[in-house]
């Protein structure tokens, strides 16, 4: 007979066992009462009676039922013969979701890979030996405690609506040069090009241009690449914000929608493109690469002639420099030709091509 103190802990050990070691998404994943008794003996050094295991399972099911989080079944822990399985909860992370998170962290720069180990330890049943042998190339970048502190200081500025002073520079090799101090009112964090970007109001620009606290603030919105920030300081400068949350959300959304490859512009342009290829496959290959680089929405205007190698699309995006880079890449696909149905974009794209030609000393262009 176990003492009463260990009996009180036993139900917690059992709850933790079913939460972390039993996989609700694997029909073959189950546990016997003998296995539970062995696990509890390993944890407490005490052998418990079988009837106490049944009683605790019933009590755990009663608790889960009261939380009203059970997604499937009548009980969280259900019996199948002499074995017990676990049913899914409403907010439970699935196997696919957990593995997707770990894979994304493992292959994404600027994310601490130690987080992978924490997630794997939370869900050991999701990550068996075969999964650990997967062919995956992790990134090598280690995130320092200083960078974590700086990122949290930005997050805190967003949450508490406090100004921050940042030291911002340009990368040269592994160092930052031409560093300057800037006072910002951080509004949001964006993830692009495997890096965080801080979306913020430039306080100095607001003061210099005498901008009002409404849509005029959008003229002072800036995007700061986080790995170009050398330092983040708390600052007593007033936090500059939009007059209400609805306007803030609208302007932020517009600012992000007008972004291309992490560049932003105040105004959006609509560009209708016709992609003509030798075959349907040629067009789809080029379109797929172009669509993956443009972070904004692309609308299919006409795909009725796709079998003839013709696809018409509409791109609404910011008038940002990298739009021309993406257009150039699209036009370099073999057996593909693009037609740009926007005179202003055509003219500026032509200047872009001439500039590239001069850099390559192609006088004929």
Image (cartoon, rainbow, N blue to C red):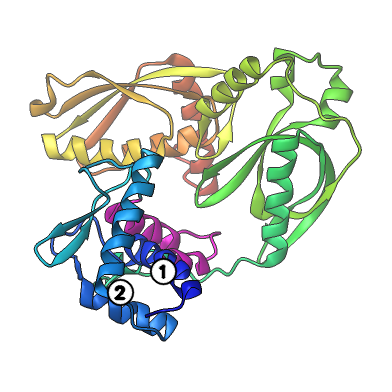
Span highlighted in magenta in the image: 93-121
Position of the N terminus by quadrant: bottom left
SS label for mark 1: helix
| Residue closer to the observer: 265 or 95 | 95
SS label for mark 2: helix
Q: Is residue 117 visible?
A: no
Is 54 left or right of 319, judged from the image as shown?
Answer: left
| Residue closer to the observer: 318 or 108 | 108
Residue 36: image quadrant is bottom left
Image coordinates of residue 298 in percent, x first then y, are: 34, 25
Label 1 or label 2, whichever comes before in sequence order: 1
Residue 173: image quadrant is bottom right
What residue appears at the point 12 percent right and 19 percent down from the top-left corner? 304
Is 107 left or right of 190, judged from the image as shown?
Answer: left
Image coordinates of residue 268 in percent, x first then y, are: 52, 19
The numbered mark at residue 13 is: 1
Which residue lies most toward the front here?
A: 1
Q: Is residue 151 magenta?
A: no
Q: Which residue is mark 2?
A: 132
Image coordinates of residue 229 in percent, x first then y, are: 72, 52
What residue appears at the point 74 percent right and 49 percent down from the top-left corner? 153
Mark 1 Cα within 10 Å, few/some/many (few <14, many 20+)? some
How far separated are the C-alphas under marks 1 and 2? 27 Å
| Residue closer to the observer: 184 or 300 | 184
Q: What secondary structure is the magenta-colored segment mainly?
A: helix
What residue appears at the point 50 percent right and 42 percent down from the top-left corner? 356
The numbered mark at residue 270 is: none
Which residue lies most toward the right here?
A: 236
Image coordinates of residue 16 in percent, x first then y, are: 40, 64
């Amino acid at each position: 007979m176990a003492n009463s103190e260990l009996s009180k802990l036993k139900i917690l050990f059992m709850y933790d066992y079913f939460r972390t070691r039993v996989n609700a998404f694997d029909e073959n994943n189950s546990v016997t009462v003998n296995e539970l008794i062995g696990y509890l003996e390993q944890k407490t050094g005490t052998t418990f009676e079988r009837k106490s295991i049944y009683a605790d399972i019933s009590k755990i099911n009663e608790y889960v039922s009261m939380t009203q989080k059970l997604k499937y079944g009548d009980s969280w822990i259900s019996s199948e013969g002499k074995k017990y399985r676990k049913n899914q909860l409403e907010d439970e992370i699935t196997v696919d979701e957990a593995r997707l998170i770990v894979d994304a962290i493992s292959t994404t720069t600027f994310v601490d890979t130690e987080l992978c180990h924490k997630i794997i330890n939370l869900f050991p049943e999701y990550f068996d030996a075969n999964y650990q042998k997967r062919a995956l190339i992790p990134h090598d970048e280690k995130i320092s405690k200083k960078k974590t502190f700086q990122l949290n200081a930005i997050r805190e500025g967003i949450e508490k609506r406090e100004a921050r002073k940042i030291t911002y520079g340009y990368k040269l090799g592994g160092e930052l040069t031409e560093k300057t101090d800037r006072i910002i009112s951080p509004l949001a964090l964006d993830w692009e090009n495997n890096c965080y970007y801080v979306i913020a109001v430039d306080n100095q620009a607001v003061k210099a241009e005498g901008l009002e606290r409404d849509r005029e603030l959008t003229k002072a919105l800036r995007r700061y690449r986080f790995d170009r920030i050398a330092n983040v300081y708390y600052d007593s400068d007033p936090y500059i914000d939009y007059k209400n949350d609805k306007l803030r959300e609208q302007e932020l959304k517009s600012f992000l929608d007008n972004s291309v490859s992490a560049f932003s512009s105040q105004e959006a342009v609509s560009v209708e493109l016709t992609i003509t290829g030798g075959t349907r496959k040629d067009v789809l290959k080029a379109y797929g690469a172009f669509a993956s680089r443009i972070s904004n929405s692309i609308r299919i205007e006409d795909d009725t002639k796709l079998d003839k190698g013709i696809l018409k699309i509409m791109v609404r995006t910011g008038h940002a420099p990298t739009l021309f880079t993406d257009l150039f890449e699209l036009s370099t696909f073999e057996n593909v030709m693009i037609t740009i149905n926007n005179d202003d974009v055509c003219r500026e794209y032509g200047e872009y091509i001439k500039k590239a030609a001069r850099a390559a000393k192609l006088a004929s262009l």
